[in-house]
């Protein structure tokens, strides 16, 4: 019997801006210090997009151009492009269409997925369906956020955490057992009051007052989100392992959302996964929201081997969360 067709990641590429915002820079902007940020979050610096006129679509376009070059794919071959982002260039049109135009993907259609820090996970699971059911052979999935465009740099609760970045993967069909095997995705809209941007949407369109009240920035109840994040990631990783008759010992790598080093440690500890199997780059980039999982994958790509069992897990605004199990394809 022929093997089942699965969507496999056949390449990954990331892009981050050159400009760094260090903890020492932040010390001059708000009442904080390197010691607090390092010990409470594990972050040392983040990248900030300061190129005039550049936005999320430009970061995506750079990541995708690098990906296509690396995988020997012509832009016209891309059939679909999905972007997980909450910082699209504009409310409409969506950023995926802009990116297709910027990279010359003339035959592709696509759309954005708004699932905050779970954006890449949601987009990956979505894109994988079109490949696994043999509708398309080349789907690009991007996770990208320009968090600096929605962060209040006078609010020490949030400005120390977030950064800018983008990463893209190519999904292609494989019948050799590798690729995306399973996922568990969850959402609970009652969490919306703990991590959100108050104004700018239809509920509260922009006015001089909303601007004066600093309502166009991220608000987060950090402590509460922390608790739900650990619980949500641990529960869905366990669920996906159980569904696939896997023990923790069968896992080669866990790629967790990079929100806080203490969250990553706590997830690994709860799951009893040794830290050598956990991808970490939070100290350099901070929390790039939908960018984190792809950027980790990009950075650890050389260490992954064909057939490795990899678990991706994330938690974010919405609330949205989940875990995905894949076998590395190259
Ligand atoms: O990615 C999407 C999902 N997001 C997350 O998963 C993030 C989850 N939350 C977190 O990562 C953490 O809650 C934070 C890093 C946001 C905050 O860390 P915390 O240990 O939960 O601190 P806290 O909010 O409980 O604040 C503790 C103290 C407070 O002072 P008092 O009230 O004890 O005097 C804060 O005012 O630390 C203070 N504080 C700071 N001090 C120095 C808060 N931010 C800062 C700061 N520098 N930047």
Image (cartoon, rainbow, N blue to C red):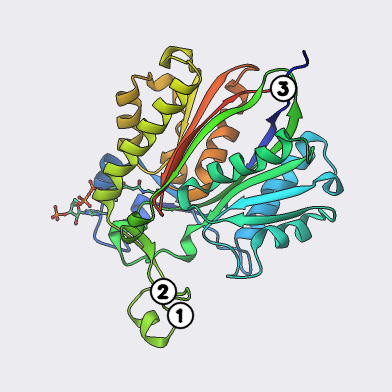
Q: Left or right of 276: which side holds 179? A: right
Dot 1 alpha-carbon crowd within 10 angstroms: few under 14, some 14 to 19, many 20 or more: few
**Is the Cβ of the residue at disc 2 closer than 8 Å to that at disc 1?**
yes
Where does residue 232 sit, x and y in percent of width and height? 36, 38
* Quadrant (top left, top right, bottom left, bottom right) of the N terminus: top right
Q: Which mark is residue 163?
A: none
Residue 151, by quadrant, is bottom left
Residue that carries the numbered disc 3 in the rendered image? 4
Q: Earlier in the sequence, mark 2 or mark 1?
A: 2
Residue at mark 2: 199
**Pointer 3: residues within 10 angstroms few (<14), some, or many (20+)?**
few
Residue at x-position 32% and y-position 61%: 193
The kind of secondary structure element at disc 1 is: loop
| Mark 3 vs mark 2, CA separation in Å | 46 Å
Look at mark 1 in the image and give the residue it sits on. 205
The answer for how far apart the CA atoms under marks 2 and 1 are is 6 Å
Element under label 3? loop
**What whole-number distance in Å separates the C-alpha atoms at marks 1 and 3?**
48 Å
Closer mark to the observer between disc 3 and disc 2: 3
């Amino acid at each position: 019997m022929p093997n089942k067709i699965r969507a496999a990641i056949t390449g990954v590429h990331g892009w981050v801006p050159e400009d760094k915002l260090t903890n020492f820079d932040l010390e001059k902007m708000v009442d904080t210090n390197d010691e607090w940020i390092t010990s409470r979050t594990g972050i040392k610096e983040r990248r900030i997009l300061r190129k005039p006129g550049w936005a999320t679509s430009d970061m995506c376009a750079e990541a995708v151009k690098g990906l296509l070059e690396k995988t020997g794919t012509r832009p016209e071959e891309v059939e679909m492009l999905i972007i997980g982002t909450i910082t699209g260039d504009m409310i409409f049109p969506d950023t995926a269409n802009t990116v297709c135009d910027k990279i010359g993907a003339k035959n592709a259609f696509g759309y954005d997925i708004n699932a905050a820090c779970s954006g890449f996970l949601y987009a990956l699971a979505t894109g994988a369906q079109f490949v696994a059911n043999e509708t398309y052979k080349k789907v690009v999935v991007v996770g990208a956020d320009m968090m600096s465009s929605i962060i209040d740099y006078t609010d020490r609760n949030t400005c120390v955490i977030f950064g800018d970045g983008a990463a893209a993967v190519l999904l292609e069909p494989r019948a050799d057992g590798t690729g995306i095997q399973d996922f568990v995705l969850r959402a609970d809209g009652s969490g919306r009051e703990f991590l959100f941007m108050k104004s700018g949407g239809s509920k509260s369109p922009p006015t001089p007052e909303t601007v004066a009240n600093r309502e166009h920035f991220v608000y987060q109840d950090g402590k509460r989100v922390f608790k739900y994040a650990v619980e949500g990631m641990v529960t869905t990783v366990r669920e996906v392992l159980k569904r696939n008759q896997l023990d923790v010992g069968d896992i080669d790598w866990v790629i967790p959302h990079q929100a806080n080093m203490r969250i990553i440690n706590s997830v690994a500890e709860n799951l009893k996964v040794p830290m050598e199997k956990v991808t970490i780059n939070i100290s350099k980039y901070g929390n790039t929201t939908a960018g984190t999982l792809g950027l980790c994958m990009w950075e650890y790509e050389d260490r992954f081997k064909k057939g490795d069992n990899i678990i991706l897990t994330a938690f974010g605004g919405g609330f949205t969360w989940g875990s995905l199990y894949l076998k590395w394809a190259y």
